[in-house]
Image (spheres, rainbow, N blue to C red):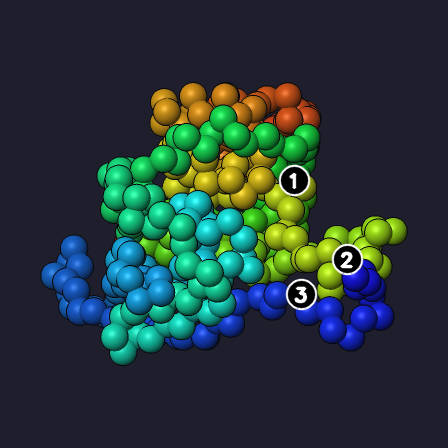
């Protein structure tokens, strides 16, 4: 028997990334209202629609979502619920807003799916309702990478979010989440629930797989090289407008992101999990104010920057809209 080499034309190709549709839907809806002066006017409110997820023709869950990136939302949901181990386990995700459904086709099925989805936990989040039990069981298995964030970078992140054009500014009533590399904004997602937004980012990271550098032994492997790997979270920072609950902390850690920043606060269980993981959790981050709830060793403090003007040079004030 002969071994396959990189020049062997019979070597199977690496598995492709999932095929995703690009389903679109309006993000806002105009309604007539009466204001405090008794005047009638039109305002925009966020759209909210159900998306029922079917995995290999089996109904799994219905998510209430804005619908901005439904395919990535479904992919990230499956990832963060630990129902699939790799992006390559998924063959395709097809979203059809006419029937409010997402059809997921896997390559080999999901092992013990009935058992793994039997237990549900009601969450503190909006727009999702419940998650499958067992997330806490994953905490002991997570080891976060070393990472640091400077206070100047933190201020850059807060300012980038403040200047971001968003559905929230035009219609309110949504949560925003973002992924940063240093001060660079990589992706920004809004949804009716912060859980949906972080799941969408998890799906985005999986779809942006990176090919690791070749090793000397790769020439003798099937396919001629290592399979692409999910985007690393080691040098990333996760930002959310919502509070840092245990579910949000665990999901960030599952994505390998060791630093999280929130415009809001933190719950007791979220704090306990963050401390257990050694995750840096920064809350109440607005202008130049913040509190670091846990993992302060990852934050490079520069207290002299806190005395600078609250509005950064060149930063325009956010427009005021009715909520």
Left or right relative to 151: residue 10: right
- Residue 228: x and y, percent? 67, 57
- Labels 2 and 1: the sequence-earlier one: 2
Label 2 element class: loop
- Residue drawn at 35 percent across, 62 percent down: 55
Quadrant of the frame with the N terminus: bottom right
Would you say residue 322 is visible in this rendering? no
Q: Can you tell which mark lies on residue 14?
A: 3
Q: Residue shown at 68%/57% (left/top)? A: 227
91 shown above or below 86: below
Which residue has dot 2 on it? 221
State how far apart marks 2 and 3 are (Cα).
Answer: 11 Å
Question: Crowding near pointer 3: few (<14 within 10 Å), some, many (20+)?
Answer: some
Whole-percent x and y of residue 317?
50, 52
Q: Which of marks 1 and 3 is nearer the N terminus?
A: 3
Q: Secondary structure beneath disc 3?
A: loop
Q: In x, y percent, where is residue 217?
A: 84, 51
Tell me the CA gap for discs 1 and 3: 25 Å
User: Which of label 2 and label 3 is nearer to you?
Assistant: 2
């Amino acid at each position: 028997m002969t071994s396959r080499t990189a020049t062997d034309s019979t070597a199977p190709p690496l598995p492709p990334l999932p095929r995703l549709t690009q389903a679109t839907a309006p993000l806002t809806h105009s309604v007539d209202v009466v204001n405090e002066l008794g005047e009638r006017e039109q305002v925009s409110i966020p759209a909210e629609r159900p998306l029922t997820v079917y995995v290999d023709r089996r109904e799994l869950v219905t998510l209430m979502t804005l619908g901005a990136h439904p395919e990535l939302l479904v992919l990230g949901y499956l990832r963060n619920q630990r129902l699939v181990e790799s992006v390559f386990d998924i063959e395709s995700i097809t979203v059809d807003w006419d029937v409010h459904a997402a059809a997921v086709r896997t390559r080999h099925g999901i092992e013990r799916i009935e058992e793994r989805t039997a237990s549900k936990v009601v969450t503190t989040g909006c727009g999702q309702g419940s998650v499958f039990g067992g997330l806490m069981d994953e905490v002991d298995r997570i080891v976060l990478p070393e990472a640091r964030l400077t206070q100047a970078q933190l201020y850059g992140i807060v300012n980038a979010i403040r200047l971001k054009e968003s559905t929230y500014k035009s219609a309110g009533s949504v949560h925003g989440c973002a992924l940063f590399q240093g001060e660079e904004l990589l992706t920004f997602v809004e949804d009716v629930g912060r859980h949906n937004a972080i799941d969408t980012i998890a799906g985005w990271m999986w779809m942006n797989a990176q090919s690791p550098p070749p090793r000397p032994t790769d020439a003798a492997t099937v396919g001629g090289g290592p399979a692409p790997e999910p985007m690393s979270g080691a040098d990333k920072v996760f930002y959310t407008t919502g509070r840092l609950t245990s579910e949000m902390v665990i999901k960030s850690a599952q994505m390998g992101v060791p630093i999280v920043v929130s415009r809001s606060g933190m719950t007791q269980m979220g704090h306990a999990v963050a401390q257990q993981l050694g995750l840096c959790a920064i809350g109440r981050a607005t202008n130049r104010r913040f509190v670091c709830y846990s993992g302060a060793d990852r934050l490079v403090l520069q207290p002299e920057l806190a005395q600078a003007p609250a509005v950064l040079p060149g930063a325009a004030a956010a427009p005021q809209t009715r909520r």
